[in-house]
Image: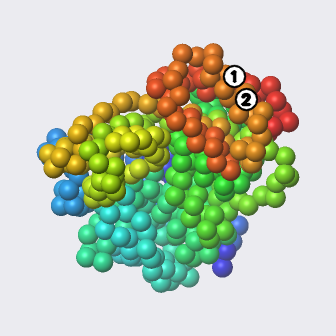
């Protein structure tokens, strides 16, 4: 059978009127003889409220015990939306049932707040589809072998949707959002940004992992691994959106987009003995601190980029290391990254020359550079990088139509 997975983000299900309007999206696929699975996020603003409630009651949300309860609390947002969406479908005589992670089940590891999906039992979903029932699955969450609720991290409903699509060999996974697709830059920042009709998994993976929030990078990884075509599409307009899939590209380097990330921090650690560097890394991992990039490694000094969301956990880890005399001290600075993404751009010297030319116009200090096959990322000592992004877009994309 032809299966379509439809994922609706928080802004799409922000209120009951919006949820009711989305029923037509489901009905259209049913009318096209497709079987539909719906995955939902929490209603806009709900997760932030739940996070606030948790921190009001306990500020130490980095231990396994507190994170387990934190995940349990946060998962309630998607559970509520799934039930509301199922009610909306039933109102229009579409057979539907809400499903939660523990009912399916969606098995994950025990890394609370950043869990990774290990396995999905598709039997219940498959049986419901055969009965003509539309499963409405609460995204963003899973369950461990010890029956504890986990969450997949911010934007985790995207991961749920693509994982479900992969497990059931779906024809396509549609990610409904409130933007028209994937653009060469943030269209709110750069109105002349170009929308892509198609984009490769590799390019989308780089954009998503470097700050573009249209889809979670782990969802793109999942799509790439299991060859699931993904479409990013506006929930309330008639545009065709952007399809993410493998596309044969000519050898000529081309720029796909410019993105930035201000939700990162630079931690400079002063170590007593470089031999203890791996003790530092292991202690960070103990507190589930993600290491995004090591920008500098010198004698008794290392600089690491980590997500801003891991600030509290990293401070706890570093304070303990300092008390144990493994590190002398550490400094935390707000920074930002600006990234140019595209096919084979690492091998085009002119692109790097243009990047450095643009940066020379601004009073910024370059703290790190990373050049990979499909992207060039630069860490800067300031977070108001929007003018830099706009200037890069102007030079590399707007005035160079041959590069896109």
**How crowded is the residue under tag 2: few (<14 C-alpha within 10 Å), some, or many (20+)?**
few
**How crowded is the residue under tag 1: few (<14 C-alpha within 10 Å), some, or many (20+)?**
few
**Quarter of the C terminus within the rendering:** top right
Label 1 element class: helix
Residue 366, image x, y percentages? 53, 28
Please state which of residues 99 and 311 is positioned toward the viewer in this rendering: 311
Residue 343, image x, y percentages? 74, 48
Name which residue lies at 82% across and 54% down.
249
Q: Is residue 357 above or below residue 4?
A: above
C-alpha distance separating marks 2 and 1: 6 Å
Q: Is residue 72 left or right of residue 255?
A: left
Query: Given contact means CB atoms under 8 Å apart, are the residues at marks 2 and 1 in contact?
Result: yes
Q: Is residue 43 above or below residue 35?
A: above
Q: Is residue 28 left or right of residue 248?
A: left
Q: Quadrant of residue 244?
A: bottom right
Residue 138 showing in the rendered view: no
Please state which of residues 76 and 254 is positioned toward the viewer in this rendering: 254
Name which residue lies at 54% across and 59% down.
219
Please state which of residues 99 and 298 is positioned toward the viewer in this rendering: 298
Name which residue lies at 68% across and 29% down.
355
| Disc ID at residue 335 | none
Q: Is residue 180 above or below residue 358?
A: below
Name which residue lies at 44% across and 30% down.
335
* Residue at mark 2: 353
Q: Quadrant of residue 172?
A: bottom right
| Disc ID at residue 357 | 1
Residue 136, image x, y percentages? 46, 65
Q: Is residue 258 above or below residue 4?
A: above
Residue 351 showing in the rendered view: yes
Q: Is residue 335 left or right of residue 277?
A: right
Label 2 element class: helix
């Amino acid at each position: 059978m032809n299966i379509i997975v439809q994922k609706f983000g928080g802004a799409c299900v922000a209120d009951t009127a919006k949820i009711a309007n989305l029923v037509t999206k489901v009905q259209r696929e049913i009318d096209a003889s497709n079987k539909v699975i719906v995955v939902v996020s929490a209603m806009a603003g709900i997760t932030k409220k739940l996070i606030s409630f948790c921190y009001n009651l306990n500020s130490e949300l980095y231990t396994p015990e507190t994170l387990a309860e934190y995940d349990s609390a946060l998962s309630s947002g998607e559970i509520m939306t799934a039930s509301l969406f199922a009610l909306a479908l039933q109102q229009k005589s579409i057979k539907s049932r809400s499903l939660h992670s523990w009912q399916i089940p969606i098995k994950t590891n025990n890394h609370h707040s950043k869990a990774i999906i290990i396995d999905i039992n598709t039997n219940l979903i498959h049986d419901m589809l055969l009965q003509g029932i539309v499963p409405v699955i609460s995204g963003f969450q899973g369950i461990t072998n010890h029956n504890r609720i986990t969450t997949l991290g911010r934007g985790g409903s995207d991961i749920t949707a693509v994982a479900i699509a992969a497990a059931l060999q779906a024809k396509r996974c549609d990610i409904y959002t409130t933007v028209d697709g994937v653009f060469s830059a943030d269209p709110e920042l750069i109105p002349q940004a170009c929308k892509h009709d198609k984009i490769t998994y590799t390019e989308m993976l780089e954009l998503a992992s470097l700050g573009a929030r249209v889809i979670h990078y782990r969802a793109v990884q999942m799509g790439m691994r299991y060859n699931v075509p993904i479409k990013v599409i506006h929930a309330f307009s008639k545009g065709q959106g952007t399809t993410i899939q493998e596309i044969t590209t000519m050898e000529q380097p081309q720029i796909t987009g410019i993105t930035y990330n201000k939700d990162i921090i630079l931690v400079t650690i002063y170590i007593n003995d470089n031999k203890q560097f791996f003790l530092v890394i292991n202690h960070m991992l103990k507190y589930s601190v993600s290491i995004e990039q090591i920008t500098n490694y010198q004698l008794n000094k290392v600089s690491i980029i980590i997500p801003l969301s891991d600030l509290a956990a990293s401070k706890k880890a570093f304070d303990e290391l300092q008390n144990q005399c493994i590190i002398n001290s550490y400094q935390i600075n707000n920074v930002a990254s600006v990234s140019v993404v595209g096919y084979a751009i690492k091998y085009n010297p002119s692109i790097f020359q243009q990047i450095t030319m643009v940066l020379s116009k601004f009073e910024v200090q370059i703290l790190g550079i990373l050049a990979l096959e499909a992207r060039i990322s630069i860490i800067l000592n300031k977070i108001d990088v929007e003018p830099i992004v706009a200037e890069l877009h102007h030079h590399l994309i707007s005035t160079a139509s041959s590069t896109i």
